[in-house]
């Protein structure tokens, strides 16, 4: 699915998660982007359109979230795991520490 401006696309990544990313990410089916909906135990065969996705399981990175909201979500995530300085559990191999949960996302319309 493409955003109205044609610059952002919603697609299934190689990891079976739903991603919102740019045209290069989409064309390659990369498991990377700006916003992600984790599949978890849900089968992608269970839905036909993004409007059917649950409102939980959404994550965004610092480039797609307002700074104040990202900082608050990051602080809450770190506090929940008892990590005040942000380095506990960070092995430097991936970017999982860049992602924060986005509560109550609901895709309400798809154009195209």
Image: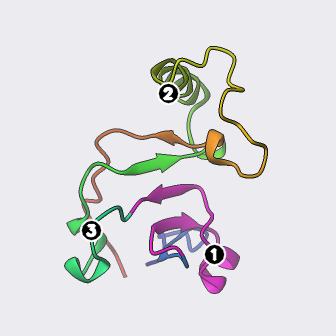
> Which comes before the other along the chain, label 3 or label 1?
1
The disc, 1 or 2, on the residue closer to the chain's N-terminal end is: 1
Pinpoint residue 14: horizontal percent, then vertical percent.
55, 79
Looking at the rendering, the stretch of residues picked out in magenta corresponds to 15-38
The reply to whether callout 1 and callout 2 are in contact (CB within 8 Å) is no
N-terminal-most mark, 3 or 2: 3
Q: Position of residue 43 (x, y in %)?
A: 28, 75
In space, the residues marked 1 and 2 are separated at their CA atoms by: 25 Å
Q: Residue at x 58, y 24 (%)?
A: 71
Point 69% across, 17% down: residue: 85
Residue wearing tag 2: 77
**Is 18 part of what is drawn in magenta?**
yes
Residue ID for mark 1? 30
Q: Tell me: 39 left or right of 74.
A: left
Q: Return the mark for residue 42.
A: 3
**Residue 36 location, x and y as percent?**
48, 58
């Amino acid at each position: 699915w493409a955003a109205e401006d044609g610059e952002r696309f919603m697609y299934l990544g190689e990891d079976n998660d739903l991603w919102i990313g740019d045209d290069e990410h989409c064309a390659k089916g990369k498991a990377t982007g700006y916003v992600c909906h984790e599949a978890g135990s849900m089968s992608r065969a269970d839905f036909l359109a993004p409007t059917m996705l649950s409102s939980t399981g959404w994550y965004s990175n610092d480039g797609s979230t307002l700074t104040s909201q990202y900082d608050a979500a990051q602080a809450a995530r770190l506090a929940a795991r008892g990590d005040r300085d942000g380095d506990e559990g960070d092995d430097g191999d991936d970017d999982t520490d860049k992602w924060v949960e986005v509560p109550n996302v609901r895709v309400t319309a798809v154009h195209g």
